[in-house]
Image: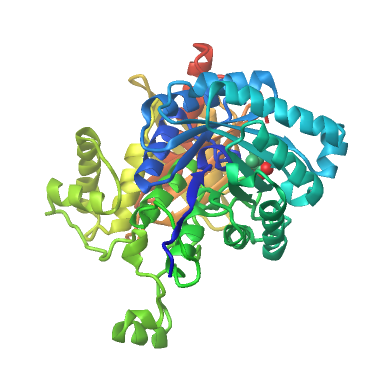
Amino acid sequence: MPEPQKIKIFDTTLRDGEQSPGASMNLTEKLEVAQALIDLGVDVIEAGFPIASPGDFDAVREIATTMKGATICGLARCNDKDIDRAWEALKHSEDPRIHVFLATSAIHREFKLQMTPEQIIHKAVEGVQRAVQYCDDVEFSPEDAARTEIDFLCEVVEKTIAAGATTVNIPDTVGYATPSHMASHIKALVDRVPNIDKAVISIHCHNDLGLAVANSLAAVQEGAGQIECTINGIGERAGNTALEEVVMAMKTRSDFFNYQTGIHTNRLVPTSRLVSTVTGIQVQRNKAIVGRNAFAHEAGIHQDGMLKEPSTYEIMRPEDVGFAKTDLVLGKHSGRAALADRAKQLGYRLTGEQLQDVFTAFKELADRKKEVYDGDISALIENKVYGEIEDVWSLVNFELLTQSGSMATIKLTLGKKGEEVSCELTDGDGPIDAAFLATEKLTGLSLVCKDFQVRSATIGRDAQGEVIVRVEHDGEEFKGRGVSTNTVEATITAVLNSVNRIEITKKLRSESRLQRKEFS
Ligand code: KIV
Ligand code: ZN
């Protein structure tokens, strides 16, 4: 077999991924994810859309200024203001890329842009030329390329490469393509665009028909040299190509796909966990590669085969994608070193201070619970390290009474700046409603519950319950997380965590340090 061809992995978790409903991340979370992407070995990080909001701008600038080891990219529409703003955010990067896009399909030309094909070409070329003045590395995307007439797409691609684009990205913006459709589009570009050898062809697929990974692989087989993807496949609507799936497909079927990537695949599960934690978007159990059940064998026949020879029912080794080999149990006699070692194996990078916090919480948990599993430790770390924000309100005490056939009664005491406030309510429509009502009453904030998820962090009746809530306040959504062996306490903690995020956002806004997104 000839030497495998290198395929670049362009990660857009922080841009397209962050655009998915409810996935917004704050600056600290974005920096954390960017560092994890570098550790994972991605080639390009699309860090955001700098013109979209001051928050996006700050994140791109901070990532561009501080992160090394990957190309840092910022998105811009084809206009001077967007491109100038993108460059302003990127200019301190060692390895910057400006990504400009303009829609090219007949539907977008007619209904969205009201522009003729000639006007589109003119604007696309102008945009690329402006970006090239700032930066050698310029990517151009004809948005909705998969639904663009192939003759016109070839013309746009040729002219933008001539204007200086070094990567031409072919987006299937609405997830409409099929593998053979995508393959024929890429083949046409390779065969018909005379200067195609001057640029890397990239592929960017959405997953509306569940075909994003298959379409990306089909594009690579016809000559695409870059795949755009996101961790856990998050992104607009049904999401984008899942990085972990497309990478593991190429690796596992290297007999068929003679390609290689720079991804350290044993970092896939920890990175997936991190993204799930900071976005609050849980990974479905049966998700390929990183789902909790991806390597679980339930049927007796399968278990028997696995014990005799794992390759009977496993095409990848769990440790190759970052699942820890053993679910080693820790207990109340385990020390800080054992916890630190376990946290490291699970893929978490903790500072000394964070380790101390997690260790204290671990000891408290180990007192209540005989066996502390990996899932418990992950839940504690995620709650302590990523869930914790400056507390305005804290839980002091609660008493809850629920009975079948009657309303829930709650007595709640919260703390704020050393003061305690309490209330008692008797009209909760169940414990969750009671927790929300009492929190609203004490904090004076109105909260609309948009999502409520509870899951067990591990197995057994004494497992910790992990609650994630998403609340709407004043037209904006905030997430909250709580973990406890008592699910009511986890619920109240999660609601309070979202309240604290609201309070902090208000505070930063009043200091003009944070603004709402202006662009959507
Ligand atoms: O889906 C899409 O078309 C995009 C472009 C901006 C590349 O995300
Ligand atoms: Zn997209």
The answer to which image quadrant residue 269 occupies is bottom left
In the picture, which quadrant includes the N terminus? bottom left
Placement of 145 over or under 254, stated as above or below: above
Seen at 61% across and 62% down, the residue is: 218
Could you say which is closer to the camera, residue 241 or residue 484?
241
In this view of the protein, can residue 393 be seen by the observer?
yes
In the picture, which quadrant includes the C terminus? top right
The answer to which image quadrant residue 126 occupies is top right
Give how far across and how far down residue 381 sits, in percent: 31, 44
Could you say which is closer to the camera, residue 150 or residue 161?
161
Placement of 28 over or under 284, stated as above or below: above
Furthest residue in direction top, as rendered: 511
Could you say which is closer to the camera, residue 408 or residue 511?
511
Placement of 17 over or under 305, stated as above or below: above
Could you say which is closer to the camera, residue 189 or residue 209?
189
Give how far across and how far down residue 92 sits, in percent: 43, 21
Seen at 50% across and 62% down, the residue is: 287
Furthest residue in direction front, as rendered: 194
**Residue 138 relative to residue 78: left or right:** left
How many labels sit on residues?
Answer: 0
Give how far across and how far down residue 243 sits, in percent: 49, 53
